[in-house]
Amino acid sequence: MIVALNDIPTRGLDVQVGSWAAAACAEAMAGEVKAYEGSLQVTRHGVHIGVRGELHLVGEVPCDRCGAACLLSLGGDLSVLYSPLAAIPETVEDEEGPPRPPVDPGFPVEDVGEYDGVALDLAHVVREWALVERPPRVLCGELDEAEEPACRARFAALSGDARGPAPVDPRFSKLLSLQPPSEE
């Protein structure tokens, strides 16, 4: 969903998340979104666009260890101020991050981003939110402790531990017959 700067009324624009947000979250989570809800308020602050709201979703993602499908729930607030690329300095003097543009003191800014200066893609905003909220790794054993032994067993079966040592590639079989030189 694309929102042009000139299309944002002075009072702001309320946007309900829809299938466009579910598709963006599915891409960010690398899984399938089962349920989602939330709303965003888009406001204009001069040439800057403020986006804040609350999002919740439940998705089915593969376990990073065993590959089994597991349910992951994400939810939380979103508060980002987007500045046009032309307004962002090329060099940053402050080591803590780029300078934040002046905005309405009533707008809590948690993060800053950039846009092309004409329009902002809200699917991109939601995709970034989901990427930040998603844990760095998803293990079904961590999401459900009762699943831990089964997760370890599936991983062992996948890695070949349950079948014994993995077969040696025939290209390396000659190396197995070589012995290191004796130290005598």
Image (spheres, grey):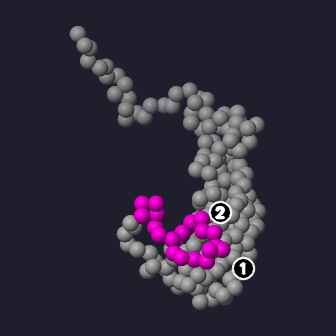
Q: What's the CA distance linking mark 2 and mark 1?
A: 23 Å
Give the residue at x 69% y 82%.
13
Element type at marker 1?
strand
Give the residue at x 71% y 67%.
54
Q: Can the viewer see residue 23?
A: no
Category of crowding for the residue at label 1, using alpha-carbon neighbours closer than 10 angstroms: few (below 14), some (14–19), many (at least 20): some
Residue identifier under label 2: 26
Q: Main secondary structure of the magenta part?
A: loop
Q: Which mark is residue 135?
A: none
Percent of width and height locating residue 68: 68, 46
Give the residue at x 55% y 80%.
48
Quadrant location of the N terminus?
bottom right
Percent of width and height locating residue 92: 39, 67
Q: Is residue 90 left or right of residue 18?
A: left
- Name which quarter of the figure residue 112 lies in: bottom right
Mark 2 / mark 1, whichever is N-terminal: 1
Residue type at mark 2 is Ala
Percent of width and height locating residue 124: 58, 71
Residue type at mark 1 is Asp
Which residue is at the front of the view, 42 or 164?
42
- Name which quarter of the figure residue 168 lies in: top left
The nearer-to-camera label among 2 and 1 is: 1
Quadrant location of the C terminus?
top left
Q: Which residues are magenta?
A: 94-113
Give the residue at x 71% y 59%.
75
Is 183 above or below relative to 58? above
- Asked if residue 111 lies in the magenta stretch, the reply is yes
Percent of width and height locating residue 63: 64, 47
Residue identifier under label 1: 14
